[in-house]
Image: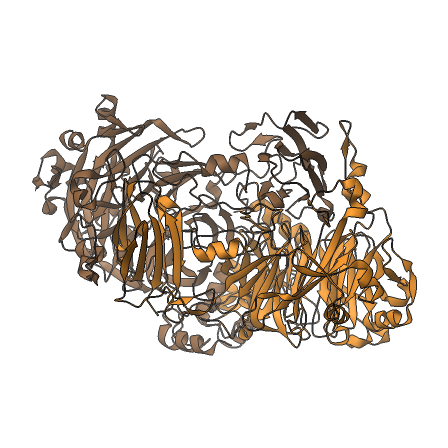
Chain colours: A brown, B orange
């Protein structure tokens, strides 16, 4: 079996496995001496090393026992969110967000689906956006800790943001954020979910037509940092209370919210402060030096954007905004003059910005610089207070003096990207080029005295090309220090070949001891995760398994179209045929109805069951109609019958022994 | 932690775990006596029973070691195929089939995507079918064994079938099968992949308009058994060499192909030989007795359809067909008169029909009958030869005498559905209502003498409501007898709650020993699997990881639009802008181009890399354009530019440290 990769793994790549087979020298964790016992025999028979056998026992979760943590993972350009259990790393659910899905989503042709998917799309975009690029999930917080209520995620492609309700694990709202074309800087939530932040990535033309030539990039393009206020009842975005801050046309990258000592601040990295626009093919000749990767990396420093959102609230309340596409915008000059926006230099083309649990340290990793750069909240606040500036950028934004705000630089390795934290004052930074994670200590405010502050402790190899990483509760004020997951972009040789597109690779690492221990690899076969958050499962206290009878999941109220069993009926009014249908094991009622070409069919289907897991599907295949209807749920479908035929409809979810008999017919007579 | 379910599992449900905690009496496999050794300590610390600890060690697959088997699983109304490793049950890949997908599929707006997804849709259906209901995957075979070349799967919703190439694990063809509205009876392949079979489920009107009132069900509706010939080079369906056999308007259910002694025969179950059409709401009153579940279960027997496809080939060659919607159809009266079609009575509303590895036994499980019903190939052939009939059905099809063809009945339990096989002459039948698997012995032709033939051996509890099941290589002439997987429809309490839609539950069972042993539960969080096939991974010898430079995956040839690096160009011809673009870490060339509203943009993008895993994405977000471009692949996109703007385009697949800089702009000036 698989001799090539097995050999290479055990000889060349065997970091934690110790490069040896079971029982041999070098494994950290051997079998017991002597016979090894029955478990040792089983492990030996499968050629597991001692460390692998230990990891097997540490990650196995029997049926009926629940994983300790949930991971909410972006799916990248799958457009969805994946939910995994930890330590098993089993895929528990996919939550469809930006891409239609027939099984676990709002299906095809339902009013909920249309409502969610078409959520206020910008007129500059196709009005049928049917995919997204999910990047950074953000769980709602209370006092800086995850509270298990809501989950937000950005669409990097289209500058949109979505809200998932953690009661039913369904997407309730997609918002096309005004004035954003694309977005990367978000989402993050502020410590009490006052706001969800999302900023533009590539700036967009602010001209009337939405068009501007690239030659007018500096003049006519702008970025926007968006602070979306949250309705605390239903988790939705409240545009009336939201605002944006206009930014220069740099490329705004990742972002994070201040917490505790840095509460009230937000931080956004940027790159391409060169304002390069590409143009690598001119006169028929390719010129790679004109590509953005070259032209946007010529400055030594880009700018960490520091935003005082509490100050912004005051300015907004005082009317210091103008309205642009329905959004209140603080103009760049106001943001500058009112102390809302400051810059600090950061090594060129940074990627991650992450605030430590105490809020004191802002860790910036510049992918072209080997250092972890630590800015201090105390220093930033003092420098702002003292107007300790090193001039302004080309748009008048004051630049804080680097020496005044930088607390430490720690050489970590090649290609540092993102940083997470444990409960012992250590930081963990992904090293894309080193394909490793650096564990390093923070400073005095995280419990490390002068002697051991800001020091690289250890590097943990991963496989391969790590992007983000996450620790348990790692973005909160109380990380657990239990598990870490490496989100590796490449997986060459770690999994058997499955064609030209390879899975990603999640690697689970135990960080509870002094030295991190690699536990397991998990192929990610249905998306390209960028970031995840890991929450203790016991915090998901709001989750339900059955809706109240007749619930509209969009409102959480009884649907005006709900029926109870026995209330089924067909109402006809001219060309409109309104059907109030029930679904119950193993029949739809009514299961047949007569219509004619040209009729508008309005279906209101109530799953009248209250048994957990008693989901029914409903399909009219020929008309591309499909809905998944959970117990207690009401689904509405409008359908213009434009073709004659006698069409089968059926239950698409195996529900009972007589599931196959749960079908019916729609007669559409020629008109 | 999960106290409720843990307690209930360990006290009430603990079949294999022995109902006790680690080390206590009752577990089949305890820790070693004395200290238990270090592994025992680890298992004990996690509260694993001895059997669970053993299962952990038996299912853990370290990174770089490859799973022994692949499972290809239908996704149900997700419309896709999932690929899992066994024994780890990790999801290695999702292969998009009937539903668009941005990450691993042909994306949005690509010519390949349109070509595949729009494959010849029947005019009676919406011309934009964008979901399917995958049910029964069928691996291609040579001499009755899986050969790792192609994979077929049916769309139960729309009567379609798809072909996946196991070189690149991508869908190459979707065929809307003529004369089928919905389909369940398939797919299966004949032993040398001569044909892939797919039959109709609900019959469809055969009137000119496609409409017929249900009152004319018997007269105007018909089913069709379809034998799709396969191009042995590219795996595609060859309609010229294919044919159908007209069937009565019963509901044709699952099907299987004969093998070895039954080579040349095909078997299809049926139900609703009552020809009930529903109608459970009349005059405003619901009448459940009129539902199909009642009306279609009144006959004691339905009909096993026995089709002699070799005889059909002869009749077809002799011109005994008529053409219907482009397909050669053997009329029902011809099928009957020429000995192509026979019926055998089977207990009412059967579900699974499965031919054992030697081809001698056809196992039919009727979900309303507690028996496994075994028909014998020898008896069937003799009865046909002797015209040993018990009359004909209402359409003139001869009915073989039940006593003559039935070899044995074995009482298995409540709700038997599907049967699989091992290498020792045992059959395994899923029991939906018992929520268990029955292991039972076949007869002398499978190696069991008179004393132990056709006997129930053991029942294996599963959790819960099992539908299909599969054994390793279980549909071939050489099952491995190593692993079995139960495909459970419900998962109540086995996994932590994730909202109102629950995952399904795959359970892995070791069947190599005398008594099957439950190993692990795997939540299925992204689809509703119906059936899977399990293949030894080493048989997947055709899989590639990189395309030859400039490959069109639809033809496997160099695309006429391919370029090598350095050949990038933009050609303008009136309103047509043709761009030959390369993608390479970390830039597109060209990365900017100027167009105007009204232009037709024709993009030909070549990923000029040859490194495994060096996939690039390409998106023009505002226009809902997204493609995933694997190394060596060419993707073509046509786009009418209907809105002014300056639009970002970017690489959607994290490819390098400077991935974020892999972006560009399209200027669309107002015209």
The residue closer to the viewer here, B259 or A519, is: B259
Q: Residue A175 appears at what percent x and percent y?
A: 39, 36
- Residue at position x 54%, y 42% in the image: A108
Rendered position, B549 above or below A291 = below
Q: Is residue B165 left or right of residue A73?
A: right
Q: Is residue A311 visible?
A: yes
The residue closer to the viewer here, B338 or A478, is: B338
Point out the image quarter for the C terminus of chain A: top right
Give the quadrant of residue B388.
bottom right
Numbered marks: total: 0
The residue closer to the viewer here, B531 or A458, is: B531
The residue closer to the viewer here, B290 or A55, is: B290
Q: Residue A44 appears at what percent x and percent y?
A: 52, 75
Q: Residue B327 appears at what percent x and percent y?
A: 67, 60
Rendered position, A111 above or below B45 = above
Rendered position, B342 above or below A21 = above
Q: Residue A384 appears at what percent x and percent y?
A: 13, 36
Give the quadrant of residue A601.
top right
Q: Is residue A542 visible?
A: no
- Residue at position x 74%, y 75% in the image: B358
Q: Is residue A437 left or right of residue A236?
A: left
Residue ranking furthest to the front:
B574
Q: Is residue A261 left or right of residue A598?
A: left
Q: Is residue A196 left or right of residue B263?
A: left
- Residue at position x 78%, y 77% in the image: B447
């Amino acid at each position: 079996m698989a001799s090539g990769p097995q050999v290479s793994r055990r000889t060349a790549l065997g970091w934690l496995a110790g490069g040896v087979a079971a029982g041999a020298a070098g494994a950290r964790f051997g079998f017991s001496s002597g016979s090894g016992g029955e478990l040792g025999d089983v492990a030996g028979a499968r050629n597991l090393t001692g460390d692998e056998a230990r990891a097997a026992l540490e990650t196995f979760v029997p049926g009926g026992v629940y994983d300790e943590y949930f991971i909410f993972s972006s799916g990248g350009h799958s457009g969805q969110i994946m939910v995994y259990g930890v330590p098993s790393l089993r895929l528990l659910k996919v939550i469809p967000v930006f891409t239609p899905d027939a099984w676990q989503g709002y299906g095809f042709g339902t009013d909920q689906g249309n409502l969610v998917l078409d959520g206020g799309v910008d007129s500059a975009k196709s009005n049928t956006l049917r995919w997204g690029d999910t990047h950074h999930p953000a769980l709602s917080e209370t006092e800086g800790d995850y509270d298990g209520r809501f989950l937000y995620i950005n669409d990097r492609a289209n500058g949109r943001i979505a809200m998932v309700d953690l009661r039913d694990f369904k997407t309730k709202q997609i918002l096309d954020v005004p004035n954003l074309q694309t977005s990367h800087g978000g989402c993050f939530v502020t410590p009490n979910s006052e706001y969800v932040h999302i900023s533009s990535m590539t700036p967009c033309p602010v001209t009337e037509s939405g068009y501007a030539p690239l030659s007018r990039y500096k003049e006519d393009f702008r970025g926007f940092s968006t602070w979306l206020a949250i309705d605390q009842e239903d988790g939705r975005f409240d545009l009336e209370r939201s605002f944006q801050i206009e930014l220069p046309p740099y490329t705004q990258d990742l972002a994070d919210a201040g917490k505790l000592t840095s509460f009230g601040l937000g931080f956004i990295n940027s790159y391409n402060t060169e304002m390069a626009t590409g143009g690598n093919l001119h006169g028929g000749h390719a010129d790679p030096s004109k590509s953005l990767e070259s032209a946007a990396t010529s400055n030594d420093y880009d700018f960490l954007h520091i935003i005082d959102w509490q100050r912004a609230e005051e300015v907004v309340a005082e009317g210091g905004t103008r309205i642009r596409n329905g959004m209140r915008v603080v103009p760049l000059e106001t943001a500058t003059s009112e102390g809302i926006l400051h810059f600090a230099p950061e090594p060129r083309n940074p990627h991650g910005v992450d605030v430590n649990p105490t809020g004191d340290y802002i860790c910036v990793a510049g992918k072209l610089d080997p250092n972890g750069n630590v800015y201090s909240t105390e220093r930033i606040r003092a420098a702002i207070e003292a107007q300790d500036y090193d001039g302004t950028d080309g748009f008048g934004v004051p630049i804080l003096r680097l020496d005044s705000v930088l607390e430490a630089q720690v050489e970590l390795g090649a290609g540092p990207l993102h940083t997470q934290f444990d409960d012992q004052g250590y930081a963990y930074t992904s090293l894309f080029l080193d394909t490793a994670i650096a564990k390093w200590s923070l400073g005095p405010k995280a419990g490390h005295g002068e002697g051991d502050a800001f020091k690289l402790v250890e590097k943990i190899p991963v496989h391969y090309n790590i992007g983000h990483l996450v620790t348990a509760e790692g973005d909160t004020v109380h990380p657990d220090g239990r598990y870490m997951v490496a989100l590796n972009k490449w997986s060459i040789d770690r999994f058997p070949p499955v064609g030209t597109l390879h899975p990603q690779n999640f690697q689970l690492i135990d960080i509870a001891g002094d030295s991190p221990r690699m536990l397991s690899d998990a192929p990610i076969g249905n998306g390209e995760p960028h970031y995840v958050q890991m929450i203790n499962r016991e915090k998901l206290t709001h989750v339900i398994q059955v809706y109240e009878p007749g619930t509209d999941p969009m409102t959480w109220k009884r649907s005006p179209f709900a029926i109870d069993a026995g209330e089924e009926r067909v109402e006809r009014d001219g060309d409109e045929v309104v059907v109030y249908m029930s679904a119950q094991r193993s029949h739809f009622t009514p299961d047949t109805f007569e219509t004619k070409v040209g009729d508008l069919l309005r279906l209101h289907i109530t799953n009248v069951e209250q048994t957990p897991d008693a989901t029914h599907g409903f399909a009219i295949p020929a008309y591309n109609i499909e809905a998944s209807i959970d117990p207690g749920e009401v689904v509405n479908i409008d359908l213009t019958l434009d073709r004659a035929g006698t069409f089968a409809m059926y239950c698409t979810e195996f529900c009972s022994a007589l599931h196959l008999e749960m079908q019916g017919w729609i007669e559409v007579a020629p008109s």
